[in-house]
Image: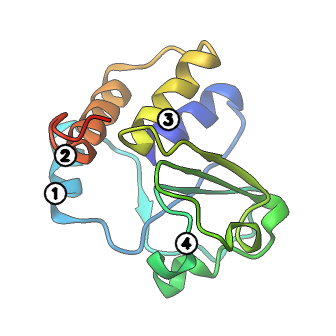
Amino acid sequence: MLAASSLYLSINPEGNPTLVCEDVSKLSNQVLETLESTTEIHEFSEKSHDLTILLDTNSRFQLGPRVVNLLGDPSRTLVIDHHEENPDIQTIAQYTLIKTNASSTCEIVFELFEELNVELDTVTANLLLTGILFDSRRFLLLW
Protein backbone atom coordinates (compact mmCIF):
# COMPACT_ATOMS: atom_id res chain seq x y z
CA MET A 1 0.00 0.00 0.00
CA LEU A 2 2.82 2.38 0.85
CA ALA A 3 4.70 1.50 -2.32
CA ALA A 4 1.59 1.98 -4.46
CA SER A 5 1.11 5.37 -2.79
CA SER A 6 4.73 6.28 -3.55
CA LEU A 7 4.24 5.26 -7.19
CA TYR A 8 1.03 7.30 -7.41
CA LEU A 9 2.77 10.39 -5.99
CA SER A 10 5.65 9.96 -8.44
CA ILE A 11 3.16 10.07 -11.30
CA ASN A 12 0.90 12.70 -9.74
CA PRO A 13 2.94 14.88 -7.31
CA GLU A 14 -0.13 17.04 -6.60
CA GLY A 15 -2.16 13.98 -5.56
CA ASN A 16 -3.37 13.38 -2.04
CA PRO A 17 -3.72 9.64 -1.42
CA THR A 18 -5.46 8.32 1.67
CA LEU A 19 -4.19 4.94 2.84
CA VAL A 20 -6.85 2.83 4.52
CA CYS A 21 -6.49 -0.49 6.30
CA GLU A 22 -8.98 -1.44 8.95
CA ASP A 23 -6.56 -3.70 10.82
CA VAL A 24 -2.80 -3.25 10.40
CA SER A 25 -1.10 -6.39 11.73
CA LYS A 26 1.46 -6.35 14.52
CA LEU A 27 4.10 -7.57 12.05
CA SER A 28 3.25 -4.80 9.58
CA ASN A 29 3.53 -2.19 12.33
CA GLN A 30 6.96 -3.58 13.28
CA VAL A 31 8.11 -3.32 9.66
CA LEU A 32 6.84 0.25 9.42
CA GLU A 33 8.62 1.20 12.65
CA THR A 34 11.87 -0.48 11.56
CA LEU A 35 11.85 1.29 8.20
CA GLU A 36 10.83 4.54 9.90
CA SER A 37 7.87 5.10 7.64
CA THR A 38 6.00 8.24 8.61
CA THR A 39 3.04 7.65 6.29
CA GLU A 40 -0.27 7.68 8.13
CA ILE A 41 -2.59 4.71 7.65
CA HIS A 42 -6.25 5.30 8.50
CA GLU A 43 -8.77 2.74 9.72
CA PHE A 44 -11.45 4.27 7.47
CA SER A 45 -12.10 7.24 5.23
CA GLU A 46 -15.21 9.34 4.97
CA LYS A 47 -13.82 11.46 2.12
CA SER A 48 -14.94 11.18 -1.46
CA HIS A 49 -12.23 9.64 -3.66
CA ASP A 50 -11.62 9.91 -7.40
CA LEU A 51 -10.04 6.45 -7.47
CA THR A 52 -9.93 3.49 -5.12
CA ILE A 53 -7.09 1.00 -5.50
CA LEU A 54 -7.68 -2.32 -3.83
CA LEU A 55 -4.45 -4.25 -3.19
CA ASP A 56 -3.88 -7.95 -2.55
CA THR A 57 -7.53 -8.95 -2.60
CA ASN A 58 -10.30 -8.98 -5.17
CA SER A 59 -13.17 -9.97 -2.90
CA ARG A 60 -15.50 -7.86 -0.78
CA PHE A 61 -15.57 -10.64 1.81
CA GLN A 62 -11.94 -10.07 2.78
CA LEU A 63 -12.54 -6.42 3.58
CA GLY A 64 -13.77 -5.06 6.86
CA PRO A 65 -17.06 -3.15 6.95
CA ARG A 66 -15.37 0.27 7.04
CA VAL A 67 -13.19 -0.50 4.03
CA VAL A 68 -15.85 -2.22 1.91
CA ASN A 69 -17.84 1.03 2.03
CA LEU A 70 -15.14 2.66 -0.13
CA LEU A 71 -16.09 0.37 -3.03
CA GLY A 72 -18.94 2.34 -4.47
CA ASP A 73 -18.32 2.79 -8.17
CA PRO A 74 -16.54 0.02 -10.12
CA SER A 75 -15.61 2.53 -12.84
CA ARG A 76 -13.47 4.34 -10.25
CA THR A 77 -11.86 1.23 -8.77
CA LEU A 78 -8.66 -0.61 -9.68
CA VAL A 79 -7.70 -4.00 -8.24
CA ILE A 80 -4.05 -5.06 -8.15
CA ASP A 81 -3.70 -8.65 -6.97
CA HIS A 82 -1.90 -11.97 -7.37
CA HIS A 83 -4.75 -14.24 -6.24
CA GLU A 84 -7.18 -16.09 -8.52
CA GLU A 85 -9.77 -13.71 -9.92
CA ASN A 86 -13.06 -13.51 -8.07
CA PRO A 87 -15.96 -14.38 -10.43
CA ASP A 88 -17.78 -11.25 -9.20
CA ILE A 89 -14.84 -8.91 -9.81
CA GLN A 90 -16.84 -6.69 -12.20
CA THR A 91 -19.13 -5.71 -9.31
CA ILE A 92 -16.04 -4.39 -7.50
CA ALA A 93 -13.75 -2.95 -10.17
CA GLN A 94 -13.85 -2.12 -13.83
CA TYR A 95 -10.04 -2.07 -13.93
CA THR A 96 -7.90 -4.97 -12.80
CA LEU A 97 -4.27 -5.95 -12.82
CA ILE A 98 -4.36 -9.55 -11.68
CA LYS A 99 -1.29 -11.71 -12.22
CA THR A 100 -1.81 -15.12 -10.67
CA ASN A 101 1.72 -16.16 -11.64
CA ALA A 102 3.22 -13.44 -9.40
CA SER A 103 4.48 -14.47 -5.97
CA SER A 104 2.91 -11.40 -4.35
CA THR A 105 1.12 -8.16 -5.04
CA CYS A 106 4.38 -6.42 -4.10
CA GLU A 107 6.02 -8.09 -7.09
CA ILE A 108 3.33 -6.59 -9.35
CA VAL A 109 3.78 -3.13 -7.81
CA PHE A 110 7.55 -3.43 -8.30
CA GLU A 111 6.96 -4.28 -11.97
CA LEU A 112 4.84 -1.12 -12.28
CA PHE A 113 7.75 0.96 -10.99
CA GLU A 114 9.97 -0.62 -13.64
CA GLU A 115 7.46 -0.28 -16.49
CA LEU A 116 6.83 3.37 -15.67
CA ASN A 117 10.56 4.14 -15.16
CA VAL A 118 9.94 5.42 -11.64
CA GLU A 119 12.96 5.22 -9.36
CA LEU A 120 12.49 3.41 -6.05
CA ASP A 121 13.61 5.12 -2.88
CA THR A 122 15.28 2.94 -0.23
CA VAL A 123 12.27 2.68 2.09
CA THR A 124 9.91 1.73 -0.74
CA ALA A 125 12.36 -0.85 -2.10
CA ASN A 126 12.69 -2.39 1.36
CA LEU A 127 8.92 -2.43 1.85
CA LEU A 128 8.44 -4.22 -1.47
CA LEU A 129 11.20 -6.71 -0.71
CA THR A 130 9.68 -7.41 2.72
CA GLY A 131 6.28 -8.00 1.14
CA ILE A 132 7.70 -10.33 -1.49
CA LEU A 133 9.65 -12.29 1.13
CA PHE A 134 6.60 -12.60 3.37
CA ASP A 135 4.13 -13.61 0.65
CA SER A 136 6.52 -16.07 -0.98
CA ARG A 137 7.42 -17.58 2.41
CA ARG A 138 11.02 -16.51 1.81
CA PHE A 139 10.91 -17.71 -1.81
CA LEU A 140 9.77 -21.23 -0.85
CA LEU A 141 6.60 -20.83 -2.92
CA LEU A 142 8.10 -20.47 -6.37
CA TRP A 143 6.00 -21.33 -9.37
Question: SS for tag 1?
Answer: helix
Question: SS for tag 3?
Answer: helix
Question: SS for tag 4?
Answer: loop
Instruction: Name the residue nearer the viewer: 31 or 73.
Output: 73
Label whose residue precedes the other's in the sequence (1 or 3): 1
Image point (68%, 67%), residue name: 89
Q: Residues within 10 Å of mark 4 (few under 14, many from 20)?
A: some
Q: Residues within 10 Å of mark 3 (few under 14, many from 20)?
A: many
Q: Is residue 32 left or right of residue 17?
A: left
Q: Locate residue 126, reporting x and y percent.
A: 27, 28
The quarter of the image holding the C terminus is top left
**Amino acid type, mark 3:** Ile
**Amino acid type, mark 2:** Val
Question: Residue 108 bears which disc, if any?
Answer: 3
Question: Residue 59 bears which disc, if any?
Answer: 4
Distance CA(mark 1)–CA(mark 3): 21 Å
Q: Which residue is mark 2?
A: 31
Above or below, 99 relative to 25: above
Distance CA(mark 1)–CA(mark 4): 23 Å
Callout 3–callout 4 Cβ contact below 8 Å: no
Q: Which residue is mark 1?
A: 27
